[in-house]
Amino acid sequence: MTRAERPCRGGAPVLALHRRLSPRNADSWDFRWVPVCSSTEILLKQWLLQSPLMLRPRVVTARQQRWGVGQRGRLWQAPSGGVWLSAALPVVSDDHTNTGAGLLGLSLALALAERLEHSGVSVRIKWPNDLLVGERKLAGLLPGLVQRGNHLRLLRCGVGLNVRNAVPAGAVALREFLPTATPQLWTAEVLLALADCSTKLKDPESLIAQVQGRLWADHVLDPAGGGAWQIHGLTSTGGLRLQRGEESKEWIRWP
């Protein structure tokens, strides 16, 4: 780890905004910020290994990432101006015993979609873990679970949200709709969405119904060249239900 990648406390503007948005939960996060890193996922993993006892949720944020990772190991462009973070939330009860990574990703997608809608930005959820404005990608989410034996120990989430950063073709940044949006403000908003995940996971039926109402399309092309499938909603575990004629199947992740 280079000196620039060592997590430091920093991030005072984010914590101040979080305190203003959620005064009751002002001190609910262990927060670390770095100016630049290879990946916040790597830094969070190192932090958890070095200090495994967690009393509060933890988050690592970076102004810029060199090697951010998205779904299926794809590199995520993460230049200065966006929200790039990785978080871990301890599981302190049996409420999430049956939680899978699919439901966790959808709960965060819904929670963040609601924060954006509250600010006037209408988004759709591209299953399993992307947020779109129209057909352009605004945010990508990377959910994961940490278990100890048969017990769920941690909920983990990586988040990349375009705010004021340059974006590639096919993507969009919040500045187009919210000219005064800042990475600091939307880091605080993401923390509120993360905190809301556990609540949403307690009612999977409501979660699935609300996500289904925000799905990005009514059909999807099979990446393996199998033509188009009609989307018939989601399964109880967050899988995508597909139908084509008499044939049906479920995707639990992209093929």
Image (spheres, grey):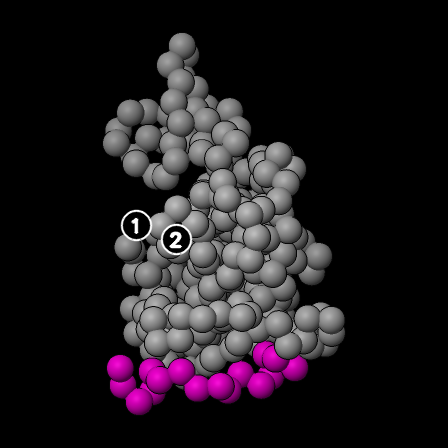
Distance (Cα) linking label 1 and label 2: 21 Å
Q: Residue at x 50, y 87 (%)?
A: 10
Q: Residue furthest top?
A: 246
Task: Give above or below for 16 relative to 76.
Answer: below
The quadrant of the image that shows the C terminus is: top left
Q: Amino acid at mark 1?
A: Arg
Q: Amino acid at mark 2?
A: Gln
Task: Give above or below for 76 relative to 56.
Answer: above
Q: Residue at x 37, y 81 (%)?
A: 36
Q: Residue furthest bottom?
A: 3
Q: Residue at x 48, y 35 (%)?
A: 237
User: Is residue 4 found inside the magenta-colored segment of the image?
Assistant: yes
- Which segment did they paint magenta? 1-17
Which image quadrant is residue 176 in? Answer: bottom right
Can you see residue 39?
no
Quick one: SS at disc 2?
A: strand
Task: Give above or below for 29 relative to 151.
Answer: below
Image coords of residue 94 (percent x, y): 55, 48
Image coords of residue 5 (percent x, y): 33, 82
To which residue does mark 2 refer? 147
Q: Earlier in the sequence, mark 1 or mark 2?
A: 1
In the image, 53: left or right of 92? left
To which residue does mark 1 refer? 72
Which image quadrant is residue 190 in? Answer: bottom right
Considering depth in this image, is 116 or 100 the residue closer to the camera?
100
Q: Residue at x 58, y 86 (%)?
A: 12
- Which callout, 1 or 2, points to the residue nearer the camera? 2
Q: Are marks 1 and 2 in contact (CB under 8 Å)?
A: no
